[in-house]
Amino acid sequence: MSTVRDHDSTSATSTLWLRNCPQQPRAAVITLHGGRADGYQTSRPWHLAALRMRPVLRAAASALPLDDVVLAHVRYRHRGWNRNDPLIDTYRALSELPQIAGPVPVVLVGHSMGGRAALRAASHPQVRGVLALAPWLPTGEPTAQLSGKTAVVVHGERDRVTSPRASADYVRRARTDRARIGMIVIRKGDHAMARRSSLWHRTVATVVADLLHPEVPPHGLTAAGCSATDSLLL
């Protein structure tokens, strides 16, 4: 099993926090943590929302060859969504990546508020796929940017912070915009991904590998979720 190498050569002003950076990368996985609806407090790496994504990135790394995949987090300026602040930060991180790794394909993995930002940022040309974990998806959240992209939404059945029903509605609307998107529901899963954490992490590993290395014809958990009429229940 692969492990994340400790690597942080980026400057304090960089939006992209590198955790693994090979010499000749072929792809990148970037995580986006959760936050608040509003709040201009400075986001810190020791806040719980940011710490929650470390095992998620390790889970993704366990399914990837670390000698050719960049692993990184997005550094937010603020803790709140405010006026699209995390989305702006994500675009900044994506604009920094080519200077480090070249124009490599990217999979975005976001949780809660970060899931919303990841789905919004799918329009970026380097983004190959999106994995949104327990995303915060307010009514009317746009889906057109997912046209031609692949995305998977994973939500806990017992999430009391963000809505599994809103996620299911989002997936249905995105499919009308020609997105290749599916939804997976974790039985008894919660918003923090603490209940049945091993299943959450196995799902992350499988889906990220699927998104970075798509097969023809498609197969695996991602293909099953995207082809299913209803949500897959794990």
Image (cartoon, rainbow, N blue to C red):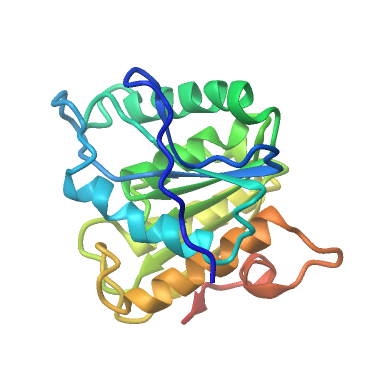
What residue do we see at 41% from left, 78% from top? 199
Q: Which residue is rendered at x = 58% and y = 64% of the image?
A: 207
> Which of the 4 image quarters holds residue 95?
top right
Query: Vertical placement of 40 versus 123: above or below?
Result: above
Residue most extreme to the right: 216
**Residue 106 coordinates in the image, percent (x, y):** 62, 41
- Up the image or down, 41 lies above or below 161; here it is above
Residue 208 location (% of width, % of height): 58, 59
Q: In the image, what residue occupies the spot 52% across and 72% down?
A: 231
* Residue 140 seen anywhere in this rendered image of the structure: no
Asked where in the image residue 102 lies, by quadrant, the reply is top right
Give the image quarter of residue 220: bottom right
Residue 181 versus residue 184 in the image, above or below: above
- Left or right of 127? Residue 17 is left
The reply, left or right, for residue 181 in relation to residue 217 is left
Give the image location of residue 49, x and y in percent.
23, 48
Q: In this image, 206 relative to 43: left or right?
A: right
Where residue 196 appears, as percent x and y from the top left, is 32, 79
Q: Is residue 173 left or right of residue 213?
A: left
Q: How many numbered discs sit on the rendered protein?
A: 0
Q: Nearer the viewer, residue 137 or 128?
A: 128
Q: Is residue 125 visible?
A: yes
Q: Residue at x 20, y 64 (%)?
A: 160
